[in-house]
Amino acid sequence: MNASKFLVIAAVMSMPAATFAAGADGHGHGMASGEPGKASQASRTINVEMYDNYYEPEMIDVEPGETVRFVVENKGNLVHEFNIGTPGMHDAHQKEMKMMVEHGVIQGGQIHHDMMDMDMGNGHSMKHDDPNSVLLEPGESQEVVWTFSDKGNVEFACNVPGHYQAGMYGEINFK
Amino acid sequence: MKVRLLTGLLSLLMPALVLAGEYNLTVDRVEIDTGDFVKEGIGYNGKSPGPVLRFKEGEDVRINVTNNLDEATSIHWHGLILPFEQDGVPGISFPGIQPGETFTYEFPITQAGTYWFHSHSGFQEPDGAFGAIVIEPEGREPFRYDREYVIQLTDKHPHSGDRIMRNLKMMPDYYNRQQQTVGEFFSDASSNGLMDTIKDRMAWGDMRMMKADVEDVQGFTGMINGKGPAQNWTGLFEPGERVRLRFINSSAMTYFDVRIPGLDMTVIQADGNNVQPVNVDEFRIGVAETYDVIVHPRDEQAYTIFAESMGRSGFARATLAPEEGMEAPIPPMRDPARLTMADMAGMPGMDHGDMDHGDMAASEDMDHSSMENMDDSKMKDMDHGSMDGMDHSKMGGDDGQPSDPFYAKGSGIMPVAANDGKFLSYADLKAQKPLYEEREPTREIELRLTGNMERYTWSINGVKYEDADPIRLQYGERVRFKFVNETMMTHPMHLHGMWSILDVGAGKWNPIKHTVSVQPGTTVYMETEVDAPGQWAFHCHLSYHAAAGMFRKVIVEGGPDSTQAKTDVAIEEGGDA
């Protein structure tokens, strides 16, 4: 890593919104998409499979205020994310994920968890541990329990650079 | 144009539906109107470019090609994997299609993606004989988009291909309009000092070359889907839709730098093969390459698709708009690129003493013994750098400028995005789903890309096609090709029939392509799984370089017995490539 690279990091780190969380908070939107739920309150379980680079299913119907338990499995060969948020939140999180890729935290099919703990200065790290998302290596499976708010523009998306733009997103339709 | 025949009875008995498509193409004299001039050319089904052929993976196609010209013709299916007798290169795959004759191509479609087709006879391709191929995959596309367009680029010249070749042979700088002027001499002299400027000009004079030799055929009109800049081909969209654009560079000689001001582009496919998506602001498309991108225009406005030639001697322009007739501003072309001494670093026999001056990247680069080191260090960089997941094209060079490992350090033609954003590099291309297992190559073949600009001869290892022995490969081996570009021009090298696994330092994720650009002063490696018996063409895809001799026949020895016999027949019938 040369000097100019370091300057870029320093510049990004000094920006007020540069949290390395999954974009659900810290951007002044509050929880426009909802809030973490308890599995015991979940009305149902929805299985979401992640492939290179798309979801199955690509559209999910929910009731306003409903708590859903998502069981997310990465069936592809690349690292993928399942993240519930508004398009604006995804856009902000993509900038963070881009940095994670540029620093080698995510490489093709691997997540280097040790690098996530690296101190980036100002008390920041590249941890990816927000409750509205999971980041999975191929073969991994994890749960997200989410209580949706009232109607809003909410998508589930993979914010690994390029994946969202290529079409790795799905719509949440409020009934 | 096409009749789909479902083999009905069989499909009732077989689990998989067998599709067979029949297509008809005529090869015709056509009129081409660029908006700047009208000329006679060659097209398919009465037009240039010809139709977009839409195939489906798993389909067996029959394509009847009727030659309405008074000369022989051929069609090569660029990038398609097929039996070699169907590959359409006269003298290598088949004898060609005589005037008045109808030839029927028959082959299975075993892949998906964006490709193209063109004549492989004489200069029919620069004269307009090309079209697009879009193959729908068997399963779903691993993308989401609402609509798609083919964006087929070309560099239409007012002169016929034959005339251009004659002029180049007579006077290699015939079409080089950007030669440096006296005024430029004095402005260089004031900024670089008079002695350095004189030395620089003398050094270039000794090499019988000009800094402006980025493009050796200028004076063309850039076209998109058969429309010149003023005719403005327009693709419609509804705001909020995602649009897939299938870029194909069908130019005879011209590389284009492509951008759409106001829109990010996500590259999802290169040369028909899906790549891990890359967000870019701009990309360079080599001759014969294809890139698919997805854009997401959200606003009710027009966007200009702007494609400047690499040497900035011309541009193509089209529009994406919610309604026909809407336009966005056309950006001015940027200053022409000038080759630097770094782009010459691969040239042998240079007088090093005269070349030690200010604007060289590093004078030791010119020393041949350290050139080895230059390559080594580049490869080392690529292996380790990319393994670390670093984004090379964003990495600063020593001076903080962006650098691209596929250009010589200090190169004058290394691309930079117009908005200082992300410019796609080969180093960004990683296979979405690797086709081949990674394994050690069985051997390495060095191919030096060579030429003599003064006589307009282009060659490989100093030998032009007519004088060269074929390259013999063994069926089942994996060959590593080492391209060493000893010229000052970029060469898009195209191997027919088998994939080119481009070494970007990503190991098993290295992308597969059909055309690999080799920049001046660089060494590029690619590997090929020799899995297609028969004989194939392997050449620079710049039309006049291929014709001048930068071309080889590749013979794949071994494989199933039946193909060996067919090869012998094709050789006997012969013809010119």
Image (spheres, coloured by chain):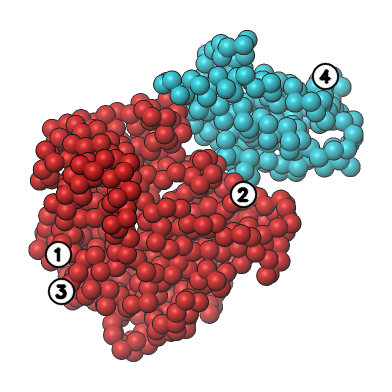
Chain colours: A cyan, B red
Nearer-N-terminus badge (1/2) = 2
Q: Residue at x 57, y 53 (%)?
A: B260
Q: Secondary structure at mark 1?
A: loop
Q: Is residue A148 visible?
A: yes
Residues at marks 4 and 2 on the same chain: no
Q: CA distance from mark 3 to mark 2?
A: 54 Å
Instruction: Name the residue carrying label 3.
Output: B572
Q: Quadrant of the C terminus of chain B?
A: bottom left
Q: Chain of mark 4?
A: A
The three-letter code of the residue at mark 4 reads Lys
Q: Residues within 10 Å of mark 4 (few under 14, many from 20)?
A: some
Instruction: Name the residue carrying label 1.
Output: B455
Q: Position of residue B25 (x, y in %)?
A: 44, 79
Q: CA distance from mark 1 to mark 2?
A: 44 Å
CB-based contact (under 8 Å), mark 4 and mark 2: no
Instruction: Name the residue carrying label 4.
Output: A38
Comparing B8 with B247, the one in front is B247
The three-letter code of the residue at mark 2 reads Leu
Q: Chain of mark 1?
A: B
Q: Residue at x 23, y 43 (%)?
A: B194
CB-based contact (under 8 Å), mark 4 and mark 3: no
Picture quadrant of residue B111: bottom left
Q: Chain of mark 3?
A: B
Picture quadrant of residue B471: bottom left
Q: Nearer the viewer, mark 3 or mark 1?
A: 1
In the rendered image, the vertical position of residue A29 relative to residue B470, given as above or below: above
The three-letter code of the residue at mark 3 reads Glu
Nearer-N-terminus badge (3/2) = 2
Q: Quick check: A99 left or right of B107?
A: right
Marking on residue B263: 2
